[in-house]
Image (tube, grey):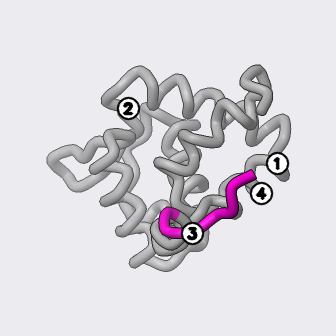
Amino acid sequence: MDESDPIEQARGFIHANIHSVDHFRVVLLLHDDPERRWQESEVVGRLRLPPPVVHTVFTDLHARGFIQPDQDGCYSYAPQREELAVMMRKLADLDRERPVSLIRMIYSRPTEPQAFADAFRIRKPR
């Protein structure tokens, strides 16, 4: 694994924090306009995603510290840790420079049941 490769640097972060391409699209939209306050319905219209998907993604992004709600029920990009801000800048750059590689990485993210099952896989010694 080449640690200088931005895709490899982002792999663990994506696998831990980005659950789907829709999840990435939402956080990237908010990241790209950090001063804007977004209602869920605006994101639904902008990205053409089902309302339950956007609601679930907003809930998860808030729990992970990427976005913050205001008193009006709108959300803004406001990473709670510097690591989140740094990695989102890298992911935004990767999305512009190597979008196919980034999307493949998101799709290759192991599902939780698969990761759990893999933990119990019996491997032959080498």
Q: Main secondary structure of the magenta part?
A: loop
Rounded to the nearest angstrom, the CA distance separating label 4 from label 3 is: 24 Å
Instruction: Tell me which amino acid carries mark 4.
Output: Arg
Whether the residues at callouts 1 and 4 have beta carbons within 8 Å, the answer is yes
Residue 79's disc is 2
Disc on the earlier residue, 4 or 3: 4
Question: Regarding mark 3 in the picture, which secondary structure is present there?
Answer: loop
Residue to which mark 4 is pinned: 104
Q: Nearer the viewer, residue 95 or 126?
A: 126
Judge the density around disc 1: few (<14), some (14-19), many (≥20) Cα neighbours within 10 Å. Answer: few
Residue 121's disc is 3
Residue to which mark 1 is pinned: 101
Q: Position of residue 25 (x, y in %)?
A: 60, 55
Q: Position of residue 89 (x, y in %)?
A: 60, 28
Instruction: Tell me which amino acid carries mark 2.
Output: Pro
- Asked whether 89 falls inside the magenta stretch, the response is no
The part of the chain drawn in magenta is 119-126
Horizontal side of 28 relative to 3 (left or right) equals left
